[in-house]
């Protein structure tokens, strides 16, 4: 038996979640955000699965954009931070990549660029996120400068929502008010991430930019019941050891867990070297043979230990689900003080990705 630390990626679930996003914002174009290797799910398999039903892809850098072109995908591809250096500009032009423009130097660099094909640009406005973008009172001047450049094609407007995952927060409405003041028809605009797409109709505008929801994890602490998402990734490993430990025996580095009685302990073939969160506390759930068991002791690089009390007849080779349907990535993220996004992105290349067409149910 070879080491089993595997992410099965359920492409039907991906298609289902895309349909949910479409249903939430039926009037808008859809830009699927596939940065960071499609949130750890694998850029090209995900892009090919979504290709027929999205208007654009968004990524972070040329290293993520060029593989899409090389795979023959001719969609609009938006680079969310634009070019990082002026010498990338000719590649944007040659490969017809869209640049987000958020700093004055980028406008200057475009003015000096010697390119034949114009680049479509997305002018980023900082309406409250405090990250990338021109402040609202600088944005109109930046738009005029861009519009005056021969090498700039269409100009669209973009902003990013800071608190759309908090349904009670007034911030989204405030950001949209600032954004709306700047945009004169017929210019197109985009504001909505997954949380905006799911919850805030007034943010949908011409383009929505869902990321995490496509992978079936909710950006909200309490998922939106009207838009049931299906988890796309199931992270699984196997039991490689089952044994009884006596009362008082420690488990793992530092003996963080001490057996309160004689008990069966399982060792599972996954650890922080695979991207399982090292900070997972005792009690973080896993699923084994349809039952929930708890992580005990510190996470090692290659292994974790689980409490097998109450699990009927556990055996070496049994499949253990770290996240997927049950437990969900959101539940694991809550236990570990992080978000599903980070769990997905931090999976290492050592985890084999296996692509399935069916949706996820039961044991494989
Ligand atoms: C990552 C990202 C998104 C997608 O966000 P989700 O919360 O994953 O939907 C949208 N827009 C920008 C600018 C981003 O960086």
Image (cartoon, grey):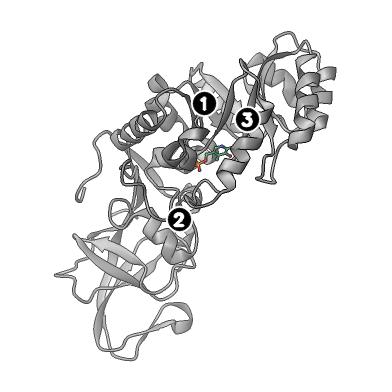
Mark 2 or mark 1: whose residue is earlier in sequence: 1
Q: Please state the horizontal and vertical placement of residue 301, each as a whole percent of the image.
A: 47, 64
Q: Residue at x 54, y 37 (%)?
A: 35
Tag 3 and tag 1, C-beta contact below 8 Å: no
From the image, tell me which residue sits under label 2.
Answer: 274
Is 262 placed left or right of 63 in the picture?
Answer: left
Rounded to the nearest whole Å, what is the CA distance between mark 3 and mark 2?
44 Å
Q: Residue at x 78, y 10 (%)?
A: 150
Is 191 placed left or right of 269 in the picture?
Answer: right
Q: Which mark is residue 180?
A: 3
Mark 3 or mark 2: whose residue is earlier in sequence: 3
Direction left: furthest residue: 312
Residue 83, quarter of picture: top right
Direction bottom: furthest residue: 248
Residue 119, quarter of picture: top right
From the image, tell me which residue sits under label 1.
Answer: 207
Rounded to the nearest whole Å, what is the CA distance between mark 3 and mark 1?
14 Å
Asked whether residue 251 is in view, the answer is yes
Q: Secondary structure at mark 2?
A: helix
Rounded to the nearest whole Å, what is the CA distance between mark 2 and mark 1?
35 Å
């Amino acid at each position: 038996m070879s080491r089993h630390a595997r992410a099965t990626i359920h492409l039907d679930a991906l298609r289902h979640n895309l349909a949910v996003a479409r249903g939430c914002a039926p009037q808008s174009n859809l830009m699927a955000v596939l940065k960071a290797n499609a949130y750890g799910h694998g850029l090209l398999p995900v892009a090919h699965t979504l290709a027929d039903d999205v208007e654009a892809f968004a990524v972070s850098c040329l290293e993520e954009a060029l593989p899409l072109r090389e795979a023959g995908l001719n969609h609009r591809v938006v680079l969310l931070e634009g070019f990082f250096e002026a010498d990338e500009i000719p590649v944007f032009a040659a490969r017809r990549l869209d640049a987000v423009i958020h700093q004055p130097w980028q406008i200057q660099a475009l003015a000096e660029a010697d390119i034949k094909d114009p680049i479509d640009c997305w002018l980023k406005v900082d309406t409250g996120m405090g990250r990338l973008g021109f402040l609202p009172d600088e944005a109109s001047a930046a738009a005029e400068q861009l519009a005056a450049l021969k090498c700039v094609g269409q100009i669209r407007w973009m902003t990013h929502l800071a608190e759309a995952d908090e349904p009670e927060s007034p911030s989204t409405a405030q950001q949209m008010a600032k954004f709306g003041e700047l945009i004169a028809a017929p210019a197109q605009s985009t504001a909505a991430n997954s949380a905006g797409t799911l919850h805030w109709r007034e943010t949908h505008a011409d383009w929505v930019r869902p990321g995490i929801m496509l992978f079936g994890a909710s950006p909200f602490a309490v998922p939106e019941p009207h838009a049931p998402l299906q988890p796309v990734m199931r992270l699984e490993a196997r039991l490689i050891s089952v044994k009884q430990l006596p009362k008082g025996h420690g488990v793992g580095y530092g003996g963080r867990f001490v057996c309160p009685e004689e008990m069966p302990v399982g060792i599972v073939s996954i650890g922080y070297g695979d991207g399982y969160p090292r900070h997972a506390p005792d009690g973080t759930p896993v699923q084994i043979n349809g039952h929930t068991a708890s992580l005990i002791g510190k996470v090692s690089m290659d292994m974790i230990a689980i409490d097998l009390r109450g699990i009927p007849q556990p055996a070496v080779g049994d499949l253990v689900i770290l996240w997927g349907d049950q437990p969900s990535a959101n539940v694991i993220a809550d236990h570990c003080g992080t978000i599903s996004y980070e769990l997905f992105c931090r999976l290492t290349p050592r985890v084999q990705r296996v692509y399935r067409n069916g949706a996820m149910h039961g044991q494989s």
